[in-house]
Amino acid sequence: MKILIFFFSCVVALYCFSCHQQPKSKPVAVVKKNVDSSKLKTADTLHKVLIIEPDLRALVDELNYYLRANDSIAAFGYYDPKVYRLRKSEIDSLLKNDESAEAKGKVQGSSLNPYLQYYADSLLRKVLNNKAIVKYSLDSILDMAVAVSPDKRLFSLSYAANTGGSYKERRSYIHYRPAHAPVLNYYAEEQNTDSLIFNTDGFYYIDTISAKGGIKYLLFGTIQGCNSCLGEYVQLAHFKNGKAAIDFSYNIDHGLYSEEEAIEFDAKTKKISVNLVPTKDELFDCDCNTSDARAALHSGYSPKADSLDVSSKLKTAKFLKCIFRFNGNTFVLDKKQSRVPQ
């Protein structure tokens, strides 16, 4: 009998220990080796702070509700719209127009999510434009992925669009806090020049770099473009006279399951390196040229294109290595190696 009691006690103790030790699941992020992954803040790693202002606190609480609701809904799942904070007219419209519903009183997630995202986006605009928002770091109050620059002035915010396709689209925003001027906000979903200068899928890491004209920001991002491909991108930006400008931009596509990330930044040498060895079944374009150089090539402006050694053969290169160095203002191509098919 004593043996049975001892055995039962061990089982209970082991179960309790495993419950307390079970780690929380976190979103998968592609992080460069020389980046401290603890800087990445998401809904799973947030440490909430008390918001003193009642109006801002109410806005943030409501916003976080819609962000969490959106994250909990799968595009092809079925849900009861009445349990969410929607207007009666919106609920009636969903139930009436969703012909794909398999169960009475439920609608497909792909139909429900746009309503939740509408409220989330509307509330986020109000939060970012609230006068008291500069008192708080966004990564400590919002239930969404937030990348913060080392000087705490630039924020990249994003959350999953949950469209259900192989392209893992994200809704993203850029929030900047100048030293002596009103905040600047850029909404990726708005189809205008100011918003589209930043990559519309957001960024997971932001660094600063000292330039001749002041501080500039280096933003890194990734996006799953299809079931087997991953896009990586980097942008160098600065803010002047109430506007943002992009000084350098580079992006590349490669296989989703590549063991190594393609784009890396060395803060000591101030160099960006791109390393890519496409497998035989990958047919992605790859070269060392920024979008400006590609535009020059297509427009027939050969001097600029030739200076970067643009070659159509590099579009099918089997090996690629590019190094961009910072010249005090922007990044320029410093070295290139490639091997084309025989």
Image (cartoon, rainbow, N blue to C red):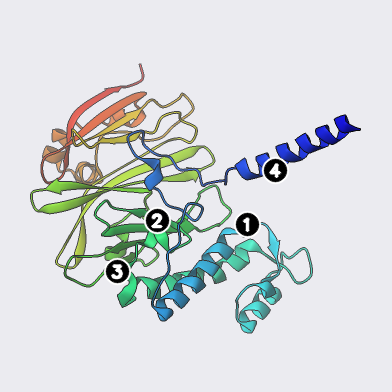
Q: Which residue is mark 1?
A: 74
Numbered marks: total:
4
Q: Amino acid at mark 2?
A: Val
Q: Which residue is mark 4?
A: 16
* Mark in front: 3 vs 1: 3
Looking at the image, tell me whether mark 2 or mark 3 is earlier in sequence order.
3
Q: CA distance from mark 1 to mark 2?
A: 22 Å
Q: Nearer the viewer, residue 170 or 181?
A: 181
The extreme top residue here reads 342
Q: CA distance from mark 3 to mark 4?
A: 43 Å
Q: Is residue 272 left or right of residue 156?
A: left
Q: CA distance from mark 2 to mark 4?
A: 33 Å
Looking at the image, tell me whether mark 3 or mark 4 is earlier in sequence order.
4
Looking at the image, tell me whether mark 1 or mark 4 is earlier in sequence order.
4
Q: Helix or strand or loop: what does disc 4 sit on?
A: helix
Q: Which residue is mark 3?
A: 134
Q: Helix or strand or loop: what does disc 1 sit on?
A: loop
Horizontal and vertical percent position of residue 241:
14, 67
Q: Which residue is mark 2?
A: 146
Q: Nearer the viewer, residue 314 or 230?
A: 230
Q: CA distance from mark 3 to mark 1?
A: 34 Å
* Mark in front: 1 vs 2: 2
| Res. 145 visible in picture | yes
Sort mark 1 into few (<14), some (14-19) or many (20+) by Cα contacts within 10 Å. Answer: some
Q: CA distance from mark 2 to mark 3?
A: 15 Å
Question: CB of mark 3 within 8 Å of CB of mark 1?
Answer: no
Q: Helix or strand or loop: what does disc 3 sit on?
A: helix
Q: Helix or strand or loop: what does disc 2 sit on?
A: strand
